[in-house]
Amino acid sequence: MTFPTICSITHTEIDLDALLAQITLPSSGAAAIFTGMVRGVTTRGEPHETVYLEYEAYQPMAEAKMKQVADEIRRRWPVVEGIAILQRVGRLYPRTPTVLIACTAAHRDTGVFEAARYGIDRLKEIVPVWKKEISPDGEEWIEGDYIPKAGE
């Protein structure tokens, strides 16, 4: 059986119901979902207002790395049935979902929570997405702490 996998950079709003319909099989009884959102107040350094974020990505490379993350999830948790990994790009305002990781499986106690957690952590590590934060005082490119190792 082929399990559904969606890996996408998108400019459009994330439709959770549509995604779940695409990654849910008749045998699926559980879905673990992580959604990251734009904060209106950022606590990095001194707390400050975020007016909006601008996300950018080189789509072919980013989607290939997302597929790598999905493949890693499948190797570590073979019971995961469906996987969706989506990252929005463009101008996004506070309270807007920016990223979604969803994993489905037959049961909740099969590692589906851990698989989704791994998915978001790994996405942050290796998927090339750039974020610029715009505040009332100016703008700043936000850099992550991770430096990829050869082969990642």
Image (spheres, grey):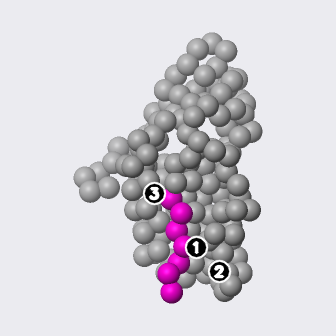
- Answer above or below: position of 81 versus 55: below
Residue 83 in percent (x, y) is at: 56, 68
Q: Is residue 17 left or right of residue 86?
A: right
C-beta proximity under 8 Å, tags 1 and 2: yes
What range is drawn magenta here? 1-7
Secondary structure of the residue carrying tag 3 is helix
The residue singled out by tag 2 in the image is 25
Q: Earlier in the sequence, mark 1 or mark 3?
A: 3
- Residue at the spot 65% in from the left edge and 80% down from the top edge: 25
Q: Nearer the viewer, mark 3 or mark 2?
A: 2
Callout 1: 10 Å neighbours few (<14), some, many (20+)? many
C-beta proximity under 8 Å, tags 1 and 3: no
Residue 12 in percent (x, y) is at: 63, 44
The residue singled out by tag 3 in the image is 66
Residue 68 in percent (x, y) is at: 40, 62
- Residue at the spot 51% in from the left edge and 86% down from the top edge: 1
- Answer above or below: position of 83 versus 46: below
Q: Which circle marks residue 82 in the picture?
A: 1
- Residue at the spot 71% in from the left edge and 81% down from the top edge: 29
Q: Quadrant of the C terminus?
A: bottom left
Q: Is residue 23 visible?
A: yes
Give me the C-alpha separation between circle 3 and circle 2.
21 Å
Amino acid type, residue under disc 1 in the picture: Gly
Q: Is residue 12 left or right of residue 62?
A: right
